[in-house]
Image (spheres, rainbow, N blue to C red):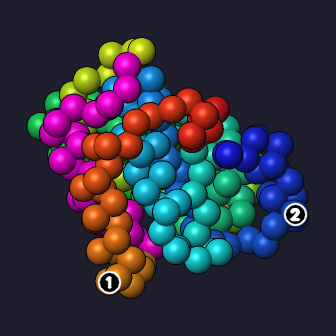
């Protein structure tokens, strides 16, 4: 189950050591391809990544990110995107790649990263030390009220996982297991109870 905003705040206030890698898997499994970030997170949870890597599920990125930045060494956001690229295209972005006026166009969730990062840095200048990367998967079908990924987004799962695992650093065996799980993921039926989003 994903931590609540108050749990993030406790960590920021000293309830957990500063550092580590936080992978924020964003999406809504009830909206077809919009659930791709959640599915990537599920596979990550099946791997032995070590205690320094925390995988969290969120329906959207909001002010929770401010608290995460205050305690994390590295933050990786995995999310569906709609940018006009071919569906299934995986790409990485740094916050500097986002235009402050157009950043909301990148994500299906209007993450407003430039604004959130600005708030975090004003509240705690040390939050600027956290490295932030966005792993995006271009989506095709985000109609509400339906499970399952479109074929091209499903086929992109191994590449998306590889991007995340390259950022966190894992053994070849772990990377191989992730690829295998990604190829099997088409048989994973979404369930609201399986991955908490909110």
On the image, the x and y values in percent for residue 189 come to 40, 36
SS for dot 1: helix
Residue 102 appears anywhere in the view? no
Q: Is residue 126 magenta?
A: no
Q: Is 179 drawn above or below residue 39 in the view shown?
A: below
Quadrant for residue 116, please give it.
top right
Work out whether mark 2 precedes mark 1 in sequence or the reverse, and give the earlier one: 2
Pointer 1: what residue? 172
Main secondary structure found in the magenta portion: helix
Q: Total of numbered circles in the picture?
A: 2
Question: Looking at the image, which residue is at 21% across and 32% down?
Answer: 150
Query: Could you tell me how far apart the alpha carbons at marks 2 and 1 are, in whole angstroms?
Result: 33 Å
Question: Looking at the image, which residue is at 67% across and 54% down?
Answer: 68
Residue 34 appears anywhere in the view? yes
Q: Is residue 149 magenta?
A: yes
On the image, the x and y values in percent for residue 90 come to 23, 50
Quadrant for residue 54, please give it.
bottom right
Q: Nearer the viewer, mark 2 or mark 1?
A: 1
Quadrant position of the C terminus in the picture: top right
Question: Is 46 in front, or is 95?
Answer: 46
Q: Give the number of the disc on residue 15.
A: 2
**Which stretch appears magenta?**
146-168
SS for dot 2: helix
Query: Dot 1 surroundings within 10 Å: few (below 14), some, or many (20 or more)?
Result: few
Query: Dot 2 surroundings within 10 Å: few (below 14), some, or many (20 or more)?
Result: few
On the image, the x and y values in percent for residue 111 come to 49, 34
Question: Looking at the image, which residue is at 52% across and 60% down?
Answer: 45
Q: Is 134 drawn above or below residue 98 in the view shown?
A: below
């Amino acid at each position: 189950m994903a931590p609540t905003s108050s749990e993030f705040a406790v960590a920021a206030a000293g309830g957990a050591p500063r550092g580590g890698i936080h992978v924020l898997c964003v999406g809504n499994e009830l909206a077809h391809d919009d659930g791709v970030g959640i599915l990537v997170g599920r596979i990550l949870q099946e791997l032995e990544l070590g205690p320094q890597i925390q995988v969290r599920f969120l329906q959207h990125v909001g002010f929770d990110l401010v608290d995460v930045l205050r305690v994390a060494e590295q933050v990786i956001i995995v999310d569906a995107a709609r940018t006009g690229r071919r569906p299934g295209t995986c790409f990485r972005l740094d916050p500097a790649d986002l235009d402050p006026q157009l950043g909301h166009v990148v994500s299906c969730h209007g993450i407003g990263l430039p604004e959130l990062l600005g708030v975090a840095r004003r509240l705690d200048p040390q939050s600027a030390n956290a490295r932030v990367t966005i792993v995006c998967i271009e989506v095709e079908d985000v109609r509400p009220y339906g499970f399952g990924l479109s074929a091209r987004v499903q086929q992109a799962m191994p590449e998306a996982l590889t991007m995340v695992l390259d950022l966190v650093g894992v053994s070849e065996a772990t990377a191989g297991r992730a690829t295998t799980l990604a190829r099997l993921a088409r048989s994973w039926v979404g369930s609201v109870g399986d991955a908490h989003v909110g």
